[in-house]
Image: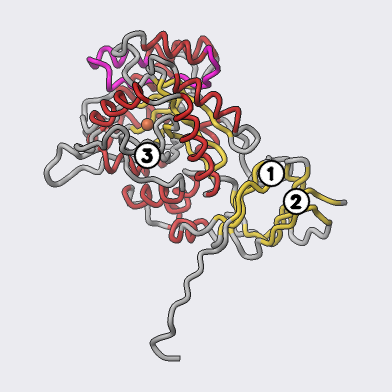
């Protein structure tokens, strides 16, 4: 018997050592000592072999635009939205496609093989949606791109915002989005949540809202989102992104809220790099950290995934597409330093986002032949070192390879 590809001697996240054989894009066998031949053999002896990284929250239409037409001087969410409004007027469809493809290559090199990207549907020219639909087609077979119809300037606040969401879904965008905390009033925000859930129920779609992305402890749209999820029977299909206001909420209120989120099967998608830099901007000291209550949500059984959110755009000047950087920051901000918590941080950029996006996941016979070989031995070392992705394999094809990072240190300190 022969296979298309065999990854030899790798260590799975649970510590088992096994060869992984892939044929016709699917995993055929996961067991030690596979003797069969293969067209391609990857030596992964002693190296961590993981399912690919998945980014549950990104903005590909603004990625790599930093400095155009200027930088965000205040560092706030609101100046970022205003700045993006200026860029929307001057960027072309081709600009967006070129930047998005460049980003996809960077992320793929770091082992990311699926991204959920919000796409701003309130671009009057609709360049953003047309560009990302084309990017989705062009990277098909290498990377899964799921698009969220995101009315950046508001479902109701933007002229024609709700109609633009529907136009984007009709054009092939996958998920219903929204930004209730940016509507003019709390009542409008709640109505936007209801409208998004109603539309998703009618069309059989998923929902992912930018929800309560502020330090305002009274921003409680997540409560409405959970209630509407239950009312429409959308359990398991809805995510609340950011949820930063929960960081600042009253503890008694949160003791009621988190069980409601869990009961509704609503997932949470914090974005640690962005939450830690956009929130707390109006504080003196102590400065709030802005990330939602990740350990408490996990303890209640809520699915939580960490997202990258932004890379070099109006909201964030850094970012590399490396989900290990994202998990590393989430681990620190969430004080998640126990061995179990650190492993769950690795899960939050692999298994958990797969559940939220509805993707196949895992390294078992019959699964997609997609995996990453890392230059370390286990998930905790992956978080500590954020090492080279030695090989990235998508549906049985090697799509990226890296050399180990090598440093030679002059001998010192005795024998
Ligand atoms: Fe976002």
Q: Nearer the viewer, residue 298 or 318?
A: 318
**Can you see residue 49?**
no
Separation of residues labelled 3 and 2 (CA atoms): 35 Å
Q: Quadrant of ligand 1?
A: top left
Q: Are marks 1 and 2 in contact (CB under 8 Å)?
A: yes
* 260 in magenta: no
Residue nearest the observer in this picture, 24 or 121: 121
Ligand 1 is within 8 Å of the C-beta of the residue at disc 3? yes
Question: Which residue position is annotated with label 2?
Answer: 5
- Between 99 and 58, the residue placed more toward the observer is 99
Residue 227 versus residue 241 in the image, above or below: above
- Check contact, mark 3 vs mark 1: CB within 8 A: no
Q: Which mark is residue 20?
A: none
Badge 2: residue crowd in 10 Å (few <14, some 14–19, many ≥20): many
Which residue: 51% across, 9% down?
Answer: 202
Q: In this rendering, which labeled residue sits more in front, label 1 or label 2?
A: 2
Residue 83 location, quadrant: top left
Image coords of residue 153 (percent x, y):
31, 19
Residue for badge 3: 271
Q: Residue at x 77, y 40 (%)?
A: 24
Left-right relation of 30 to 107: right
Look at the image and name its color scheme: secondary structure
**Residue 234, position in %: x, y?**
49, 19
Instruction: Give SS at disc 3.
Output: loop
Q: Which residue is mark 1?
A: 369
């Amino acid at each position: 018997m022969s296979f298309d590809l065999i990854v030899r001697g790798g260590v799975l996240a649970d510590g088992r050592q096994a060869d992984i054989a892939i044929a016709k894009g699917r995993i055929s066998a996961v067991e030690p000592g596979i003797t069969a031949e293969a067209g391609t053999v990857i030596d992964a002896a002693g190296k961590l072999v993981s399912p690919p990284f998945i980014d549950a929250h990104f903005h590909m239409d603004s990625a790599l635009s930093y400095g155009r037409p200027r930088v965000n001087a205040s560092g706030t969410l609101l100046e970022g939205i205003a700045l993006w409004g200026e860029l929307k007027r001057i960027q072309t469809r081709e600009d967006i496609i070129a930047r998005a493809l460049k980003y996809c290559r960077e992320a793929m090199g770091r082992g990311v093989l699926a991204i959920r990207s919000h796409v701003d549907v309130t671009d009057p020219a609709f360049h953003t949606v047309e560009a990302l639909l084309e990017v989705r087609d062009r990277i098909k077979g290498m990377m899964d791109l799921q698009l969220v119809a995101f009315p950046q300037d508001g479902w109701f606040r933007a002229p024609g915002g709700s109609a633009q969401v529907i136009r984007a879904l009709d054009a092939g965008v996958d998920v219903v989005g929204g930004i209730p905390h940016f509507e003019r009033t709390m009542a409008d925000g709640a109505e936007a949540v209801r409208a998004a859930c109603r539309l998703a129920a009618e069309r059989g779609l998923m929902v992912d809202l930018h929800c309560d992305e502020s330090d305002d402890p009274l921003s409680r749209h997540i409560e409405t989102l959970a209630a509407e999820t239950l009312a429409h029977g959308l359990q398991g299909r809805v995510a609340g992104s950011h949820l930063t206001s929960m960081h600042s909420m009253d503890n008694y209120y949160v003791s009621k809220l988190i069980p409601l989120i869990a009961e509704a099967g609503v997932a949470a998608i914090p974005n640690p790099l962005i939450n830690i830099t956009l929130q707390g901007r109006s504080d003196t000291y102590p400065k709030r950290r802005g990330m939602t209550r990740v350990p408490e949500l996990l303890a209640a059984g809520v699915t939580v995934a960490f997202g990258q959110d932004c890379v070099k755009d109006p909201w964030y000047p850094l970012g590399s597409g490396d989900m290990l950087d994202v998990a590393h920051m989430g681990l620190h901000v969430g004080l998640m330093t126990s061995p179990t918590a650190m492993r769950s941080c690795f899960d939050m950029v692999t298994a958990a986002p797969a559940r939220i996006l509805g993707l196949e996941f895992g390294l078992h016979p019959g699964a997609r032949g997609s995996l990453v070989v890392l230059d370390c031995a286990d998930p905790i070392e992956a978080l500590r070192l954020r090492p080279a992705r030695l090989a990235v394999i998508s549906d049985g094809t090697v799509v990226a390879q890296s050399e180990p990072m090598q440093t030679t240190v002059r001998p010192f300190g005795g024998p």
